[in-house]
Image: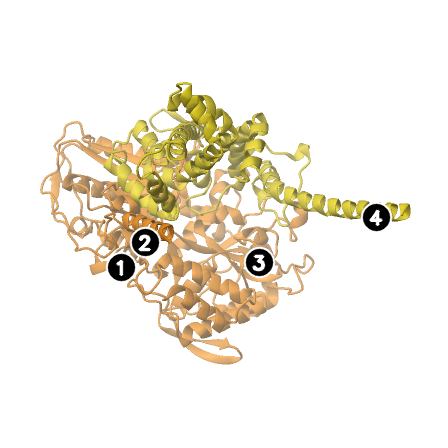
Amino acid sequence: MADLFVKNEKAYKAQRAISNTLLYLFLVIVAIAILIPFYWMILTSLKNETQVIQIPPILALAPSDWKLSNYTALFAVINLPNGETTMLFPFFTYMGNTILISFLTTIGTTITTILSAFAFARLNFKGRDALFAILLATMMVPGEIFILTNYLTVNKFGWIDIFNQTYTEAVLAMTVPFLVSVFYIFYLRQTFKQIPNELYFAAKVDGTSDFKYLIRIMIPVAMPTIVTIIILNSMGAWSAYMWPALVTVNDKYRLVSNGLRGAFTNTSSGRTDYGQQMAAAMLVTIPLLIVFFTFRKQIMRGVSRSGIKG
Amino acid sequence: MKKILFGLLTVLFVFAVSGCVKIGTTELTTLTTTQQLDYLPDEDVEITFWHIYGQGKTALLDAMIAEFEAMYPNVTITSTSQSDYDTLRSTINMGISVGQVPTMALGYPDHFAGYITAGAVEPLDQFVYSDKVYEVTNPASSIYGDTVSTTLTLSDFVQSYLDENDQYTGGYYFSLPYSKSTETMAVNRTVLAAHVTEIRAAGITISNNGFLSHETPLNYDQLALLKNIMVDTNGTNATTLQCEYLLNFDSSGNLFINMSRQWQAGYTDSEGHILINNDTTKNMLSYLDTLFQNNTVVLPVAWDQSYGSTNFIYGDVCMSVGSTAGVNYNIPNSTYTAASMKLGIFDVDFLQIPQFVTANNQEFTANVSGTDVAVNGNLSAVQQGPNIGIFSSASSAEKLYAFLFIKFLTNTDNTARWAMNTGYLPVRLSAYSSEVPLQLTSTFSITYADFLQIAQDFWTADGTVTWEATDERWDYLYSSMVANIAYNQTSYYQYDPAFAAGTSSAGSAKARVEAGYCLQYIYTDKYTPTEALSFMLNQLTW
């Protein structure tokens, strides 16, 4: 009998070792697949023009061979005919715009999402389910359709004046259409609905207002979900490309994603300076990495809770 | 059941509502033109000009704008970069639906084809052929007291550039040429010089130091002879100074389109008809397939590259056809890894792209799958690069000044300045003899005519000039070569018909992409020539 147990234990251990090996092998492969683009971005940013196009490609560079010229070129200042100076790649302008737009859309989306989700989850009013169903149905309409309708709406508001668009108008045009997300409302509503009704009724008995109940009880309880929403929304705003390009008439109002696309392509030959482009991409990525490492606990908790990968 | 029904009705409602939006029609609207003003307006006029140039090129553009504004002090030109061509086109396309378009913009022919279909572009003929003369009466103007007109001397423009810009509905000029380029052929002169005796024995004229004719393009029969001399199909051979392949074409799309013209095979027309389904195109593709198989012609896909210039520098291929704007990518130097450069650092020369005939409508014989086929040939070289146009939503005063600005940008001196500064080609023939000096560096100033002379002097001396090593002419030698070659090709430039996607076929931009894929599929043996052509047709027609 004891032999049988020992045999089973050995078999179990062997089985576990194999499954663990396979699991970690799989994870390592996935991790490599994820890390290779980052590695390649950093490596390319440290190559000179001829190293970038070398065949077969250079897979590694010794620190002594690193070229920082791509980074210094990003901050090169050129003189304009009117006596003013400008950076070859207006990195700080693009970054400033991107941070502002991300901040505004994230704050706005979070507020509208919390209030809407609370209304749909907790408040009783006529047509609530019908309204929610209509909102959910809009998720089936392709995003490209909304580009057109949003563009027309924003234009009606007078924010796309190609002759005199101000920075404020450009910011409004870039943010207002994205201050509401049906998906996030649905997502947070489901979280709110999991909070027991008894809590709400007890708070009501104590004379708590709906708003106070939302602030004091529901938001703290649903905080991991809200953090997830903040992260996903920030990432979406950070990498937005098409919409900012369409509704802004001046390059200096645009986001870093727009700048990365066009600034490094030779308009005559159509060739891209990948070294400089990757250096700029690297600089754009750094703030995201700082945010990730600063808030990694919250991010991991939020992502694992939602089961959603950004 | 009730819930399901409700859900379905909701979805239906949302889709119905999302369609309730009025957008600009994509059908060709009736052509309306504004009457050209009889006077030069003195009220303040604001012109917005959208382009894609980054800071490197806008410095000169801004300088030209400042000069124009000094000529017309009541005019303010706001020039804005839209980052890249895709953004420029999509932003304008969106703006057309709500009347938010600039006064004028840069664009490729297929961009303008789309704008024209939406009725958004102003035909420029009224200005081009105008007999109106305006006196500049503003004392603050730098040309106070002079007379100006919008009339253009069309005979001074490169004819094919004009043809490209009046190919649209009704034959109107909806745009005018601005930043143009073409293709030329870089050749490894060191390899040529090493085989001078054999090349002469094959009946091809070559100088002692390996210069082939810059006036007469090579033909494909001569390429076959050169292939036998300059190519080792087993791989580049540093001992015998032979490359693995003879001739690379950077753009497979351009190769398909240009060879279709050289064979008079038919490609597309400006009405959007796809004309490739014919025996001549099939023969042409089979002929090219043979050239692919015997290492005469190679595409960058052979090395998993977008361009073949790096492999040209590495010595994998002895000749390479590419854009005039990418000339410097073909020049080997010590920054490349020495071990990769199988033939070391070699001398480079530039030639016209190969042709089949020496004059239009001349017959030549091509060996197609072992059978000689008689083909009626034409001379052809691609022209590419954006044009400039005015939108019809602008006011009469804006249109008048916008046209004067186009005329200013493309006048003899300015098109020469623009060409030397940017690497594009002048749009006027008179620019080639322009005497306006351009300060290229703090110590080097040169006219376009003298700029062209740099390569001519070099060629005349058979490459043995006695310039000092510090002579700044060395820095401009290759761009001068390319400018000369481009000029020699001017008489047979051909434009790519432009059309927007329609009810029966894809747009011209898509056609170009599929033409490139077609040759790549043949090169990689994914499809036979017949299958590749059939696949291309399926992609372009419905």
Which chain is disc 1 placed on? B
Identify the element where label 1 is drawn: loop
The residue at which mark 1 appears reads as: B167
Query: Do the residues marked 4 and 2 share a common chain?
Result: no
CA–CA distance in space, label 4 to label 2: 76 Å
Q: Nearer the viewer, mark 3 or mark 2?
A: 2
Q: How many marks?
A: 4
x then y, percent, for residue B59: 37, 33
Q: Give the residue type that dot 2 points to.
A: Pro
The shade of chain A is yellow
Depth check: give the residue in front, B418 or A17.
Answer: A17
The residue at which mark 3 appears reads as: B318
Q: Is residue B449 visible?
A: no
CA–CA distance in space, label 1 to label 2: 9 Å
CA–CA distance in space, label 4 to label 1: 83 Å
* Figure chain in orange: B
